[in-house]
Image: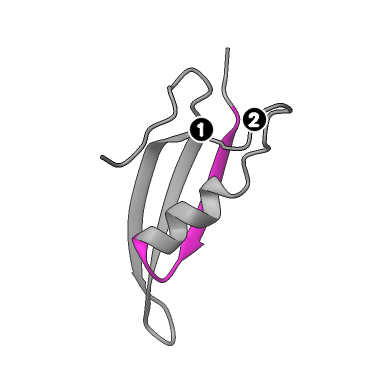
């Protein structure tokens, strides 16, 4: 079964990850979503050189909710 991927592009890796993750629909009955990074990268250049990061994620619905200890 192919999973739907979500992509984020931003000036930092963290912002790109957040942008990709925020596209995942919340499952009814849950107050959280989990994702798994499947690809990431960086591009630099252009007429007005800039650095951009991209991140692709899939929803990880089988993973347990994690907490920082």
Callout 1 crowding tier (Cα within 10 Å): few <14, some 14–19, many ≥20: many
Residue at screen point 62% across, 37% down: 31
**In this rendering, the label closer to the viewer, 1 or 2:** 2
Name the residue at the bottom extreme.
48
Is 50 situated left or right of 58 in this image?
left
> Relative to residue 47, is residue 26 depicted above or below?
above
Provide residue 19's location: percent of width, then percent of height. 54, 56
Camera-nearest residue between 7 and 19: 19
Quadrant in which the C terminus is drawn: top left
Q: Position of residue 18 (x, y in %)?
A: 48, 55
Disc 2 crowd rating (10 Å Cα; few below 14, some 14-19, many 20+) is few
Residue 3 location, quadrant = top right
SS at mark 2?
A: loop
**38 falls in the magenta region:** no
The correct choice, above or below, for 9 with respect to 58 in the image is below
What residue is shown at x 47% (from left), y 39% (from top)? 57
Cα distance between the residues tagged 1 and 2:
17 Å
Q: Nearer the viewer, residue 48 or 2?
A: 2
Residue 49: quadrant of the picture:
bottom left
The span picked out in magenta is: 4-13
User: Quick check: 69 left or right of 31?
Assistant: left
Q: Position of residue 42 (x, y in %)?
A: 33, 60
Answer with the quarter of the image where residue 13 lies.
Answer: bottom left
- Mark 1–mark 2 CB contact (< 8 Å): no
Q: For numbered disc 1, what is the local secondary structure?
A: strand
So how many labels did they put on this image?
2
Residue receiving disc 2: 30
Q: Earlier in the sequence, mark 1 or mark 2?
A: 2
Magenta segment, prevailing SS (helix, strand or loop): strand
In the picture, the disc for residue 38 is none
Q: Residue furthest right?
A: 28
Circle 1 residue: 58
């Amino acid at each position: 079964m192919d999973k739907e991927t979500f992509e984020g592009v931003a000036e930092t890796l963290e912002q790109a990850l957040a942008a990709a993750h925020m596209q995942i629909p919340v499952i009814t009955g849950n107050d959280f979503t989990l994702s798994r990074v499947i690809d990431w990268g960086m591009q630099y250049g252009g007429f007005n050189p800039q650095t951009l990061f991209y991140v692709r994620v899939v929803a990880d619905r089988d993973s347990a909710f994690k907490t920082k200890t």
